[in-house]
Amino acid sequence: MATITLENVSKTYAGNVEAVRNINFEVKNGEFVALLGPSGCGKSSTMRMIAGLEEITGGTIYFDGKPVNRLRPRDRKVAMAFETYALYPTLTVYENLAFPLRSAGWSQAQVDAKVQEFARLLELTRLLHRMPGELSGGQAQRIGLARALVREPAVFLLDEPISHLDTRQRFRMRQIIKRLHLEKGYTMIYVTHDQEEAMAMADRIVVMHEGVIRQIGASTEIYRDPADDFVAGFVGEPPMNFLEGAPNLCDGAWMFRSGDRQFPFPNWLQSHGDKLPAALKMGIRPYDVSVSLDSSAPCDAKGEVFVCENMCDYSVVTVDMADVRFQAVTPPSFSANRHQPVSLKFDPTFMRFFDKSTGKAIQVSTNVQRINE
Amino acid sequence: MLQQRSSTPIEILRYALIVVILTASLFPIAWLIITSFKPADDIMVSPPRFIFTPTLDNYTYALHKANFMHFIQNTLYVAVVSTVFVIVLSSLASYSFARYNPGGGNILFFILTTKMFPAIAVVLPYFLIFKEIGDTAVGKALGIGLDRPGALIVSYTMFNLPFAIWLMVSFFQDIPRELEDSARLDGYNRLQVLWRVVLPLAAPGIAVTAIFCLLFSWNEFLFAYILTRDAARTITVGVESFFTLRGILWGPVAAAATISVAPMLVFVLILQRYMVRGLTFGAVRG
């Protein structure tokens, strides 16, 4: 087991392509951390540097306080599971699992005991004598995990291990991986572009974009208090709604004005209204928007229905407001025809505001200084 | 339903075409084999005689009088050794091209350009070069020089290498990189990864490349004709030696040609399975 620390780590590829820029974070012993971001954000490069498969061009990576920059992959005691499973196609499942142990010079009896143990843990015993070509994606990935784990690594790295699988298999693998973590207590780093996977499994999530870290936090933190508009828009399904506007003092109360719409800032911002930047972006999650067919009810915005999708457990209503399109999650009983006028009400507790020029979140409760930055 | 389908005009045309193509490609071989068993008097008569008393005279002539076994030994030696050289060099080179792309594609293209001129353009310079080398101590020690097998081995290696590299680069590119990453995490260094993981996976590709190289070296005529005289003479040139001033000895030519075709025919039939697997390599990887 190990604690991993990244200090000002950068990766520049030939031709001055900056994949990772100056990132800092720590994965504590036994922690499950997800690196989350869209493709090309540098998350895989970061993981490959931790594994030792990629040279570190700047900064230092520490395992338990010791720098590992110069260590070869084998000496870092890391294991990795790959998106493409990376099973040796010419070897049986058994031999695939035995491969890392044989390379470490184990005796046949030791190898057999270990292989059997992990085959049981990941429900593979029946498959041991098959060839990789005869397996389904889910089976192949379970073997990929088992092969990574047989060496009992200090750190377990997973590079989008389940994104090749179909939805049903993905759900099942998510539970297997999470359970494995809880049972064995491995330090785990999990790379994914799927926010749902990150939320479901990780203790903490590192959100990356264009080679830099945008936010580090537990899933609720990232979902509820995104550090900037990128994180806000990337995390959450359906995605957060955004409305551009400006602060406006009206009868002694600070209002958010956007076109001909105007509604008051939530209470926690009222006393800081004069320090707000001139151009703002309001963000609100579809779950925090309520829709009403009653046009005379008090509302924050009006629009007409674009489409209404009934998902049985809930409905997603898309509302056209001329300049923007909002989504709201409603009870499944709600139904509306297209072009039907509706009014929207935003839950002030969950309204989030971002400086339009920098994208940074306006945060008062944690740090008043932030507003003036 | 199925029965109906097989008798449509298109199906008939299909089989007719197959018959035409098979006849066109198999006739010369059939002629060769039949002629090799014909007595001299029966060969050039018109109309051709299909009923004759088979004889082994032509084979006896080719093998004993013309010392054809010697040519076969030479050919086998040159073809096998040059193929081994080509495979060792090209698998290392193409692995490097597939993984590290040195020269950003320029070097790989340069290698191809060495195949862009006809063999006849280089054979005379080669003649002069081997003539000079043959007189030096190094040339004598390595068996390189005119009428020495080393000259043909070097020439065939040079000629097959670009082709082999180009063929194998794609085989190596098809091997998922993660397999190598995984093996490195398992504790192997880069050379061990190449030896334990990459080469076994590239085996079908290597087999295909080896077959092509072997066939080329076995069938090569021009270089062998110019660079050898007697001691290092190969079968293709050996067959040509029956084209004498007094006329072409068709019987021995056919016998010699049959002997030279046979080993490659057997070889290809045995390896046919691997060749097909090699050519469809991308589809079978795990």
Image: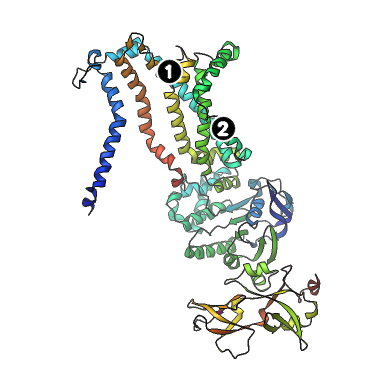
Identified by mark 2, the residue type is Ile
Say which label, 2 or 1, has the lower sequence index. 2
User: Disc 1 is attached to a residue of which chain?
Assistant: B
Q: Residues within 10 Å of mark 1 (few under 14, many from 20)?
A: many
Q: Nearer the viewer, residue A109 or A222?
A: A222
Q: Label 1 amino acid?
A: Thr
- The residue where tag 1 is placed is B234
Apparent side of residue A336 relative to residue A43 in the rendered image (left or right): left
| Quadrant housing the C terminus of chain A | bottom right
Q: Which residues are magenta?
A: A329-333
Q: Quadrant of residue B41?
A: top left
Q: Is residue B161 above or below residue A1?
A: above
The picture places residue A223, in percent across and down from the top left corner, at: 64, 71
Residue labelled with disc 2: B111
In the picture as drawn, the residue positioned furthest to the left comes out as: B51
Location of residue A250 in the rendering, given as x and y in whole percent from the top left corner: 75, 86
Residue at point 52%, 62% (across, down): A173
Residue at x 56% of width, y 32% of height: B111
Q: Nearer the viewer, residue A71 or A272?
A: A272
Q: Let me know if residue A258 appears in the view.
A: yes
Write down the chain letter for disc 2.
B
